[in-house]
Amino acid sequence: MIPIETLSVFIAASVALALAPGPDNIFVLTQSALHGRIAGLFVTVGLCTGLIVHTAAVALGVAAIFATSALAFTILKTIGAAYLLYLAWQAFRAGTAALSNNQGPALSHRQLYGLGIVMNITNPKVAIFFLAFLPQFADPAHGALPLQIFIFGGLFILATLLVFGGVAWFSGFIGEWLKGSARAQRNLNWLAGTVFIGLAVHLLAQER
């Protein structure tokens, strides 16, 4: 059984990491401000779903491939960056189309959820981070290592869900206030597109 002291330290570290400004929580913030709190929560759940994949990969040893194979790392981050650039193009188009046609959000809740998953699982840095972070807290003396990895992964996901969910909820209030202005709506769409491009560049610049 994992000692309570180890679990406490791990949870504290997980919350601190989730609170640290980064591409994921900034993305949740902008999407919540643009499309509302619920949309931000769907993105958050999508990101956390992606973390389940990374947790399983670490537990099963698959993540080690991305830590040792430059080709696998490059292919995965290129796919992720291409998808982000496509979303940026859509956001820039919505900057005028959504206003003139009084359309709703460019992405449905299902699409936002899927976007969160794709963003997370196509970021090889997350896989490598999990590969480096989770095993530090696992100890063979406390039981089967794969089971411990799944437990730590689940706790990390819970911490991320709570922190990112809070970001989504409170930034949604800002979005509701800004949406009263057509100019603000246009600026939010352009901000979202810029964030997508920034995330793509950040992803492409990553090295193993």
Image (cartoon, rainbow, N blue to C red):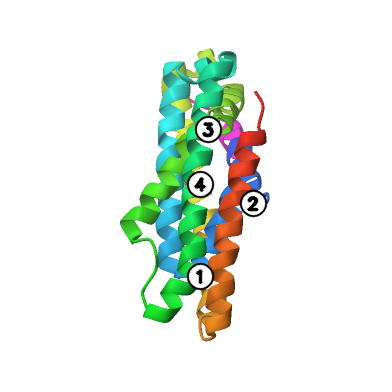
Q: Which residue is mark 1?
A: 95
Task: Determine whether 38 is above or below 150 in the image.
Answer: below
Q: CA gap, disc 2 to disc 1?
A: 30 Å
Q: Give the residue type at disc 1.
A: Gly
Q: Which residue is mark 2?
A: 19
The quadrant in which the C terminus is found is: top right
State the residue at coordinates (65%, 41%). Answer: 202
Range of magenta residues: 1-8
User: Where is residue 119 drawn, in percent x and y?
Assistant: 48, 43
Q: Residues within 10 Å of mark 2 (few under 14, many from 20)?
A: some
Q: Residues within 10 Å of mark 3 (few under 14, many from 20)?
A: some
The reply to whether the magenta stretch includes residue 7 is yes
Question: Helix, strand, or loop for circle 1?
Answer: helix
The reply to whether the magenta stretch includes residue 187 is no
Q: Which residue is mark 3?
A: 78
Q: Which residue is mark 4?
A: 84
Q: Give the residue type at disc 4.
A: Leu
Ranked by sequence position, the earlier of labels 4 and 2 is 2
